[in-house]
Every structure is written in C-alpha cells, then in structure tokens.
Image (spheres, rainbow, N blue to C red):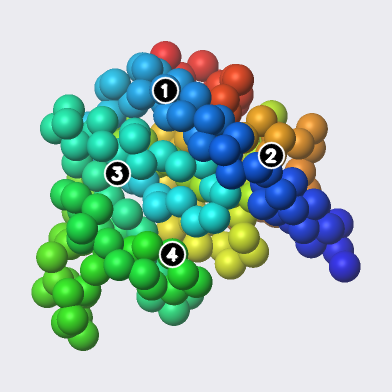
Amino acid sequence: MTQKQEMRKKYRTLRNDMDRDLAERLSARICRRISESPLFKNAKYIYAYYPLGNEADIRPVVEAAWRQGKRVAFPKVFGEELRFFEVEDFGQLSEGAFGVMEPSEDGESDPLDGPSRPVPADWRGEVALVLTPGVAFDRHGNRMGFGKGYYDRHFAGDNRCVMMGVAYELQIADQLPADPFDVVMSCIMTERNCYERKVLY
C-alpha cells in the first residue's frame, strides 16, 4: 500500500467512525461558518455536493443559498468525467454512481433533457464558490479525494473559482502527498477554522 493509500484509509476511518450525533453537530457548525463567511455572501453561484455517509452535511448551506437567490449546481458522474447541473430543489436529485445523490435525468437517456440544466460557462468566475468534499486536506490547501480524480480533472487549470474544501477538523493533516495535477484549495472550512492558502477577502 502506498503512502497516499495509507493516509486515505486512515482519514476515511477517522471520519466514518465518528458518532453520528457528533457529525451532525459539527456539520451544523461548519454550515454556520460557511454561511457567515464573505466568500459565501458574495457568491452568486454555488457548486455544492450531497453528503454521503459521515461527510460534512452542507444541505443547510444549500437551502440558505436558494433562499438568498443564489444559483446552485450539483455534480453528476459520466464515466471518467464530472459534470455539474443547476438544481433548484433537492427533489431534482436521485441516487446515482457510488450511491451518491446526483441531478436526476427524469427517466431520459440524455441528461440535457432532464429537469436539471447544465451549468453554463459563465459560472466560472470570481463569484463562483465550489464547496468541495474530500477524505483529507492539509493547511497548504492540498486535498485528498477518493482516488478517482473527478474534481482535479474538472477544475484543472481554472483559477477563477474559489475552491473551498469542507471538512471536519479531524480531517486536517499537517502535510498530504500531492501530485502536480491535483487542484489546490483556496481555503478549507472546518468547525473551528478557515485555513486560507492566500488572503481571499
């Protein structure tokens, strides 16, 4: 097992072994910190994710975004590719790849005909905030995902979005092994801290 595989296993176990009540309380703190941050308040577009298992539950942030008139998108997997679709309520999500809730195709073979709309190119700007899940993060903005590379490929070379890692404090490492193609986070939000790679506001 490589160093990266060992660390991924370690941090997945730490997160998955958390008591469910504790995970819910910490998620609520994380959501409050995100919602009160200038990065969220100034964002016009939000790239979100639907929590799986003990992942930090950001659904309250998504609901706050909808109430404030922000536009929200969720990811959907197509083979080796990740695409984002605008979603206006949780009813537009259904279980997809790996058991993750994804934008629904509404029974259509072509997802473009479904109820969710593909995210247009103009979302990629300074007002776009990407709430990014991960197995672990470090204080330098490095992210350890689930080993599939979806986020790294989708956001590669795009420095216009604010990439906010979302995690519990126990998922923060001193230093993670990183590859040249890994997308670095702009900041990481936990229940205690916001680790900024650079001054964002």
Label 2–label 4 contact, CB within 8 A: no
CA neighbours of label 2 inside 10 A, class few (<14), some (14 to 19), many (20+): some
Residue type beneath disc 3: Arg
Nearer mark to the viewer, of 1 and 3: 1
- The residue indicated by pointer 4 is 100
* Image quarter of residue 188: top right
Residue 136 can be seen, yes or no: no
- The residue indicated by pointer 2 is 171
Q: Nearer the viewer, residue 139 or 104?
A: 104
Mark pair 1, 4: CA separation: 24 Å
Label 4–label 3 contact, CB within 8 A: no
Q: Secondary structure at mark 3?
A: loop
User: Which labelled disc corresponds to residue 124?
Assistant: 3
Horizontally, residue 26 falls left or right of residue 49, namely right
Give the mark nearer the N terminus: 2 vs 3. Answer: 3
Residue 199 picture location, percent across and down? 51, 16
Q: Secondary structure at mark 4?
A: loop
Mark pair 2, 4: CA separation: 20 Å
| Quadrant of the snapshot with the C terminus | top left
Residue 80 picture location, percent across and down? 48, 74
Mark pair 1, 2: CA separation: 18 Å
- The residue indicated by pointer 1 is 32
Residue type beneath disc 4: Val
Q: Secondary structure at mark 2?
A: helix
| Quadrant of the snapshot with the N terminus | bottom right
Give the residue at x 34% y 64%: 102
